[in-house]
Amino acid sequence: MIAMPITLKQNYAAPPTDGTPPAVSVSNLHIRFGNEGSEFTALQDVSMQIQEGALVTMLGPSGCGKSTLLRCIADLVHISDGSVSVLGQMPRKAREGRDFAFVFQDATLLPWRSAIENVRLPMEVGRRDSDTTFADPEQLLALVGLKGRENALPHELSGGQRQRVAIARALVTRPRILLMDEPFGALDEITRDKLNEELLRLWQETGTTILFVTHSIPEAVFLGQYVLMLASHPGRVKEFMKIDLPGPRTLAMRDTVEFIRITAQLRALLEQC
């Protein structure tokens, strides 16, 4: 395995329009749990496409299947009917090739390993081909604003700093897709705002495709090029809305008339879910 410098793609701000295959394609997806007679439909007839390089946020009421859809894309949930394609291949193949990485709400760092050792963990487990290349862990920690904290143990870091380590760890395999399940949901508002800005910067610099689940309408609008809205009982696509806000986005933008209008529109849609 080889650790390589991070290659940045500056100012990557829009999905490609050159006809390349989508990063994620979901077609007529059904997810059911339980046995016959006690079957529960979590997702019903879900179809959508996400172009490579896009940042898509996902909203919907509790229990509508947001996390289930994310886990289905990550090959963590069995598909009942329909299909999911990740970078033109089956999710299992994409997982085996480390084409995507997952960031959960809990940073799940190993408490006995330092920040840099936690970031290195994916380099030590799983596939170890001699030609496998990884991003440089020290550069990644610097990229997420933790330069100088490489040797800190998780209990010596704040909640926001631990999530930064988790994001760096996810990026060390150079994934083309980053799946994020409410990664900032347990953080205070100020820390969450800072990490929102940090995530946008990372996305612009790396060009990674991001699918981000959140319960916060302002967060979904601030981060997303597109917002995927799911309705519940059963989970299904309610809306796939393009967010036409100028860039670069700043926190001050949340006080503008246009931002407030979009959040109000999404809130009205959410109330119908």
Image (cartoon, rainbow, N blue to C red):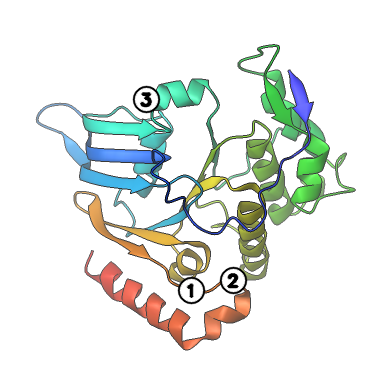
* Residue appearing at x 55%, y 26% in the figure: 98
Q: Position of residue 194 (x, y in %)?
A: 68, 65
Q: Position of residue 222 (x, y in %)?
A: 52, 68
Q: Amino acid at mark 1?
A: Leu
| Residue 248 at least partly seen | yes
Which mark is first along the chain, 3 or 1? 3
Please name whichever residue, 128 or 105, is drawn nearer the observer in this view of the structure. Answer: 128
Q: From the viewer's perspective, is residue 266 above or below residue 204?
A: below
Q: Amino acid at mark 2?
A: Arg
Q: Residues within 10 Å of mark 3 (few under 14, many from 20)?
A: some
Please name whichever residue, 88 or 239, is drawn nearer the observer in this view of the structure. Answer: 88
Quadrant containing the N terminus in the rendered view: top right
For label 2, the residue is 249
Q: From the viewer's perspective, is residue 97 above or below residue 44?
A: above
* Residue appearing at x 78%, y 36% in the figure: 5
The disc label shown at residue 245, or none: 1
| Res 108 quadrant in image | top right
For label 3, the residue is 90
Q: Are marks 2 and 1 in contact (CB under 8 Å)?
A: yes
The reply, left or right, for residue 174 in relation to residue 15 is right
Q: Residues within 10 Å of mark 1 (few under 14, many from 20)?
A: some
Which mark is first along the chain, 3 or 2? 3
Residue found at the far front of this picture: 18
Whole-angstrom CA distance, mark 2 to mark 3, is: 34 Å
Please name whichever residue, 135 or 121, is drawn nearer the observer in this view of the structure. Answer: 135
* Residue appearing at x 31%, y 27% in the figure: 78
